[in-house]
Amino acid sequence: MKEVLNSLGLSPSNPGGFSGAWIGSGKVQTVVSPIHGEALATVTNVTPQEFETVLAKCHQAFASWKLVPAPKRGEVVKEIGDELRRNKEALAQLVTLEMGKTLREGRGEVQEMIDICDLAVGLSRQLYGLTMPSERRMHRLQEQWHPLGVVGVITAFNFPVAVWSWNTAIALVCGDTVLWKPSSKAPLTAIACTRIAEKALRKFGFDPAICSLVIGKGSEIGDLINTDPRVALVSYTGSVPGGRHVGGLVQARFGRHILELGGNNAVIVSEKGDLDIALRSIYFGAIGTSGQRCTSTRRVIVREAIFETFKNRLLGLYRKTPIGDPREDKYLMGPLVDAAAVDTMLAAIDTVKAQGGKILCGGERLPHPGGCYVTPCIVEVPGNLPIVKEETFAPVLYLMPYKTIEEAIALQNGVPQGLSSAIITNDLGECELFLSAAGSDCGIANVNTGTSGAEIGGAFGGEKETGGGRESGSDAWKAYMRRQTSAINFSGQVELAQGITLDI
Ligand code: NAD
C-alpha cells in the first residue's frame, strides 16, 4: 500500500488544493479503504479562502492557455496519456484501494483514461467549424469554435479518475482550464491524477494551474463552483438530487452545465435472443463495481415464456458469486464504497419487500472486519414498483416478466431516468423497433450487449432525470467551446439579409 502511494507522489498526509502550488489548511480527512477499513492517508481540505486562490489562478491561466494552438495543447494531453501508461498499474491499485472496485475494473478505468487522451490528441487537429452558403452576394458565412473558460469538473466516487479524464482531456485540447472537485470518498486518486497532469504541463513549460484541484465538502466548495461566474461550464457527475441542485444554481447565473446523473438501466431479454449472451451481459452489468456504476443493470425484463428458465440460470450464477478482497483476481465482486451504502441497500430491500417484491437471493450484509461487503440480490417484481423507479446504487437487480415487445419497451421506458438500455434478441424487427423513435428513450441503447461498459468513442450520457448531458467522444467536445458565427462581406457594398432595403 505504501509503495503504491509513494509511486504516485502521495504522502501519509496530503494537501487537497492545487493551482501551481499545493495548499490546504481546512479540515483534515482520513481516507479509509472499504476493503478492510484501514486508513490509507489523510487529506487536508481547502478552505473557502483557498478555493478563491485556486480559482483565481485557474481563471488567470485560461488567458494564455486559450492562445496556445490546439495541436500544441494536444501534445500536453499526449504526455498525460503517456504518464498514465507508465503509472497504469499503480493508479489502478489506488482506485481499488480507495473505492473498492476489483483490480481488473480498476485497470479498465485507467485504460479508459489513456483511450480518451488518445482520442483528444487526434481531436486537437479536428475542432472543425462549418461554412454555409450566404444568401447575400459576395459574402461568406462561417462558424468557428473558441475556448470557453474554466471548466468546473465535479465527479462521483464510482469512476473516481475516468470521469475527470473524459472531461479534462477534451477541455484541454479545446483550450479550457480545469478546476476539479472530486468526491470526498475518493480524494487520493484525484491528487495522484493532478500530479500527473502537473508533471506533463511543467514538462512543456505551461502553467500547471491549467489543471487545478479543490478537495472539500460538496455543500461548501461545490456550491462555490456552482455560483461563481468565472466557471464557464460546470460538468457535474452525481446523483439526480445533486444534479437538480447544481443545475439550478448554474442555470440561475446563465452558466453552462453538463449533467451526468443517475440511471435505472434495463435489459429486455427476448425469447428470440441468445440466453448465454443475456446471462453473461446481465451478470456483469449487475454485479460489476458491486452494482455501483451509473450504467449498472438494475432491471431485467424477460419474455414470459422463458422467465423461469432465465431466472433459474441467473440464480445459479448469483449464488456462486465470488465476493472478497477486490485486489485478488479470484473475486468478481468487492465491497460497497462505505457502510452507509450498505445501509441504503438493505433499506431498499426492506422497502421492495413491503411493496410486494419477492427476494430470490442475496441482499445480506457479510460479516467482515472493517469491510463493506454484501451478497448481490435478485428481486422478482410484477413491474415498476415505486422503489424500482428509484436508483439504488448497489447490487440489487429487479426481474420482471413481459408478454409483448411493446409492453417490454413501455416497462423499460417507464422510469424517470434515461441513461442506458439494452435488448437481447436475434430478431431484426425487435431490434429495429427497440432502436427506433418508438423504442428505448435512453441516451444509450445497445443490442446483444449489456447496459454497462460504454466506449469512449461515442458521446456518453442520458435523457430525462439523467440530465441530458453528453461527454467523452463523438461531437461532445462542442459543449466545451464557444461557437461563433461570422458573416464576412467582400462585396464592397452593404446588402441586408432577408432582402430588406435601406433607402438613405
Ligand atoms: P453524489 O451525488 O453523492 O456526489 C457527486 C459529487 O457531487 C461529489 O463530488 C460530491 O461531493 C458533489 N457535491 C455534493 N454536493 C454538492 C453541491 N452542493 N455542489 C456541487 N457538488 C456537490 O454521487 P456519488 O454517490 O458520488 O455517485 C453516485 C451517483 O453518481 C449515482 O447516482 C450515479 O448514477 C451517478 N453517476 C452518474 C454517472 C453518469 O455519467 N451519468 C457516472 C457516474 C456516477
Image (cartoon, helix red, strand yellow):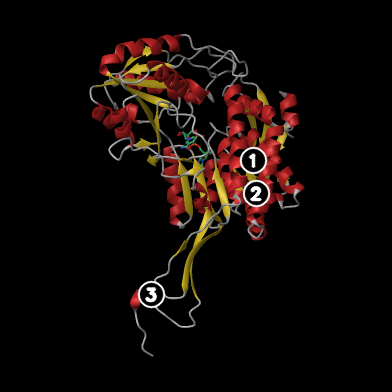
Task: Give the residue type that dot 2 points to.
Answer: Gly
Instruction: Give the numbered dot on residue 464.
Output: none
Task: Give the residue type that dot 1 points to.
Answer: Asn
| Residue depicted at 62% across the width and 28% down the height | 95
Q: Which residue is mark 3?
A: 497
Res. 4 visible in picture: yes
Local SS, label 2: helix
Q: Quadrant of residue 309?
A: top left
Judge whether 241 appears above or below 293 on screen.
below
| Residue depicted at 72% across the width and 27% down the height | 4
Residue closer to the observer: 309 or 380? 309
Q: Are dots 3 and 1 in contact, CB under 8 Å?
A: no
Q: Earlier in the sequence, mark 3 or mark 1?
A: 1
Judge whether 191 appears above or below 396 on screen.
below
Local SS, label 3: helix
Residue closer to the observer: 330 or 158? 330
Instruction: Report the side of 319 relative to 199 (left or right).
Output: left
Residue closer to the observer: 433 or 360? 433
Q: Earlier in the sequence, mark 2 or mark 3?
A: 2
Instruction: Give the numbered dot on residue 74.
Output: 2
Instruction: Report the side of 356 relative to 397 (left or right).
Output: left
Q: Earlier in the sequence, mark 2 or mark 1?
A: 1
Disc 2 and disc 1: Cα gap in Å? 31 Å
Q: Which residue is mark 1?
A: 45
Task: Give the residue type that dot 3 points to.
Answer: Ala
